[in-house]
Amino acid sequence: EAGVTQFPSHSVIEKGQTVTLRCDPISGHDNLYWYRRVMGKEIKFLLHFVKESKQDESGMPNNRFLAERTGGTYSTLKVQPAELEDSGVYFCASSKNPRIAGGTDTQYFGPGTRLTVL
Amino acid sequence: GIQVEQSPPDLILQEGANSTLRCNFSDSVNNLQWFHQNPWGQLINLFYIPSGTKQNGRLSATTVATERYSLLYISSSQTTDSGVYFCAVENAGGTSYGKLTFGQGTILTVHP
């Protein structure tokens, strides 16, 4: 079974440019999460999708960030325009729906996308 | 929101030594996971352990939910155990399920 995959692994952009990060969750996982770690701080929650719906987007820092999950499969996280403080590692995670028999709350993380804004 | 504190912040060991990492949390939890972030930055899931004890090879973990702490034991440490260990919890009293709150991590360095 393939794990969570993220693309690209690294991205270097200029301040003011746009970047789109992609996450492919584990097949069959309804829950998809975005987290990020900036400036050596703790890993922070950004948002949570259940299928294609946003369950919780309380961690999104501002309206320069837009997350989508059309069709309930892969997700994209767009930053437009990027600022210096957006630099960091963006992680995606997925989990089964715990309300379905056999599902658990275990979240499986992708390798992350390292974003550098110059 | 829920607070998660890990200790110690840094730990240096000789290969073969044993160690205990601690995670304290400030409220009841539905989910607690331990992760190892390897030198390439990947977060490897070690344990899903909201309560009880689990073992996997040289690693074991215990969560005492009523006292709001979890321990990760590493026995006979190897250089490949080096990296950052994170504890993350989902607050049972939160407004939505799934959101993990991470501790600041314990940086483990194992010397040969």
Image (cartoon, coloured by chain):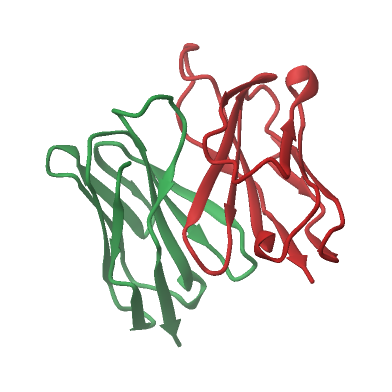
Chain colours: A red, B green
Query: Depth check: A7 or A15 in front?
Result: A15
Q: Is B18 situated above or below B14?
A: above
Q: Nearer the viewer, residue B33 or A2?
A: B33
Question: Where residue B3 sits in the image (x, y, percent)?
Answer: 29, 49
Q: Is residue A88 above or below residue A99?
A: below
Q: Quadrant of the N terminus of chain A?
A: top right
Left or right? Give the position of B72 relative to A44: left
Closer to the camera in the image, B53 or A87: A87
- In this rendering, position of residue A90 left or right of residue A14: left
Nearest the camera: B89 or A83? A83
Which residue ends up furthest to the left in the rendered image?
B67
Side (left or right) of A48 relative to B30: right
- Residue A2 image offset from top left, x and y in percent: 72, 38
The total of numbered circles placed on residues is 0
Which residue is at a point 43% across and 25% down the rendered structure image?
B96
Q: Seen in the image, is A42 located left or right of residue A80?
A: left
> Where in the figure is residue B98, as x and y percent of width and height?
46, 30
Quadrant of residue A26 within the rendered picture: top right
Image spot of residue A61 (x, y percent): 59, 46
For the point 34% across and 82% down, which residue is it? B13
The answer to whether residue A52 is above or below residue B77 is above
Q: Residue at x 46, y 35 (%)?
A: B99
Quadrant containing the C terminus of chain A is bottom right
Residue for point 67% across, 53% down:
A111
